[in-house]
Each structure stands twice: as C-alpha cells, then as structure tokens.
Image (cartoon, helix red, strand yellow):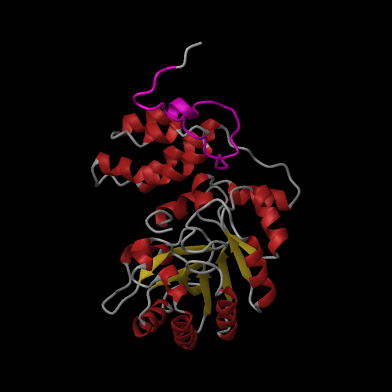
Amino acid sequence: MQDVTDLPFWRLVATYGGPDLYFTEYFRVHATSNLDKTILRSITENPTGRPAIAQLIGNDVPSLVRTALELQHYPIAAVDLNLGCPAPVVYRKCAGGGLLREPDRIDTILGALRDAIRIRFTVKTRLGFEDCSRFDQLLAIFSRHSLDLLSVHGRTVKEMYQRHVHYDFIARAVASLPCPVLANGSVDSAARAGAILNSTGARGLMIGRGAIRNPWIFHQIRQSLAGQTLFRPSGLDVLNYIRALYDAVCSNEVPESARVQKMKKYLNFIGTGVEPTGRFLYEIRRVSTRNEFFKVCECHLLHDRPLDLEPFDPIPAPTPPPINSVPSQP
C-alpha cells in the first residue's frame, strides 16, 4: 500500500510474525521514470528474512519492460504488475485499475513483460472497472501469459473498499487458471481468513489494510490453521504497537506536525477496530502535536481488555431535528 507499507513498516510488522511474502510499494513507470530509491531500499535492505516482490504500475510497454529488466538485477522473488489500484489519480491515467477498461492493452503489456521477465511474473487485479462483465475475458488473457501467481481483489475499481466482496469471482479464477491464486479483500481476522480460503479454494491470502490495523493477524491465522488458541491483543498491546509504529516510521528530520500527520494515515486503519462509535478517530483527526496524539491513544487504549481489531460496522449518527422544528408536546 503506497506510502504506508514501506521499509520501516516491513521491519516492524516482521517482529509481530509477518507474512510469508512481501510486495513492495509500486514503482511508478513512465517514459522518463527511474527506480524509486526509497522503494528500492525495501529490496536491497529487506529486513524480514522473507521474499520480496517488486510491484510496477504504468501502461507504457517499453518503459515497463525497461524497468522489469532493471529490477531483475536486484534480489527479488518476482516482478508484479498492478492492475488493481482504485485511486482516481491512478486510474484516470489508465494505470492500475484503469487498465481493466482495456483488456486488449493488458494482453499486449503482459505479453511484452512475460518475454522480458526471466524470474517469476505475477499480477494483482480487481474484477473489472465498472462491473464484473469482462472478468472471464481477463481470466483468459491471464491464462495465455503463463503467470506464476495472480492476486485477485474481489471488488471492482468503482467499488473501492465497500464492505461486500465478491469471493465467488475469486473462486472462479481459482477454478479456471493454471497458476496459484491469492484472495484479497477484507481479510480482517483469522476466522474470516479461514472462511475465505475454504470458500474460494485460493492458495493463500493477500492482506493490506488488515495488517496495518492488526499486525498480529499473520500469527493469528497460522495459529488458527494449526488449531491453536488465538492470541488476542489487549488495549495496552495495541497502544504499544502504535508507539512502536511512531518510532519506526516517523523521522526526527521532519517537523512534529508532519510526523503526526503521517501517523494519522495508519490510525485511519487502526482506529476502525478500536471502538465502534468513531469517537477515537474523530479525536485523532483533530490533534496536531505528539502529546495530543498519544493522549488520545492512551485515553482509549490504556487498558488490559482484549481487542479483536476487526472493523466495526459504523453506527449511524443521530439525525438532527429540522432547524425550525417545534418540539412535540408530551
């Protein structure tokens, strides 16, 4: 996840168990692009002890080929093409999920990359752009190009991160493709992870937002699959995670206000699993200093009660009365 799951986050999440495989943030590829040195450090300084896959995003065939060739000089397990990013700033440039509107163009890009990549070649996709009507066409294209792995996010680009995930389409990919498939989308708990694996037949899971909210999730999934009792972090455990996250990702070379703003990116994910009313996030979004930030965190998390860290369904705010309404008489 861009600007979030970077090298410092990799280093931290690995101490909580971490995944079996890491994907870099995406390298933006265009005619004049160079390898982003900050993202490249995730590969050259990989502290996890696990394989890393270099992720590309773009649509210019010669530039994608050039970048894939260059990346193969570094210690990576595979090159990955992003066809799933739903950010408007990306898809409006016909990159990421925007390419799903042009299957023929995807076909050309995959053919060129498959010829250029001598190691494993993987793809991350969504089900389509507006809807899922072209998904079978996309699967046929993926099948033609001898992919080594396909990660499928079970939503369309336009669905962004809505609650419902179409896991039946992931199962369709598993049934029709010769390569392994990873299931992605709202993998929020060990129980849900097991249910997704069972319902889709996927070889594994890709986890993004859930790992930011709950860095223990990989350990919990392994415990669940082994039939063990799951570790449940307390409020204090989560507070200590946030403290460690602040120390890991916030540089002293930038102003304190910038550090706090960076932490708000992470808290947008963590906060949805802390309490159901949204009060925690409401307060976090209004702080501007480190002291204010941790005061709010301590107010909500300085306790030993276990937390599941699954996202709560939002509680609707009460509807205010009309401005000129007259209270009813008893």
- The main secondary structure of the magenta stretch is loop
- Count the marks: 0
Query: Please, which residue is most extreme toward the top here?
Result: 330
Residue 307 in which image quadrant: top right
Q: Is residue 237 above or below residue 177?
A: above
Residue at (39, 61) in percent of width and height: 87
Q: Is residue 203 visible?
A: no
Residue 323 in which image quadrant: top left
Residue 233 rendering spot, x and y as whole percentages = 58, 37
Q: Is residue 273 above or below residue 124?
A: above
Magenta segment, which residues? 298-327
Q: Out of 38 and 179, give the one closest to the viewer.
A: 179
Q: Is residue 182 above or below residue 271?
A: below
Q: Is residue 1 above or below residue 304?
A: below
Q: Out of 247 and 192, give the one closest to the viewer.
A: 192
Q: Is residue 56 visible?
A: yes
Residue 285 rendering spot, x and y as whole percentages = 35, 37
Residue at (35, 85) in percent of width and height: 62
Q: Is residue 174 left or right of residue 66?
A: right
Q: Out of 296 and 36, give the one closest to the viewer.
A: 296
Residue 159 rendering spot, x and y as whole percentages = 49, 58
Does the magenta portion include 120?
no
Query: Please, which residue is most extreme toward the right here?
Result: 227
Q: Is residue 98 left or right of residue 152?
A: left
Q: Where is the N terminus found, in terms of image quarters?
A: bottom left
Residue 92 rendering spot, x and y as whole percentages = 35, 68
Residue at (51, 36) in percent of width and height: 238
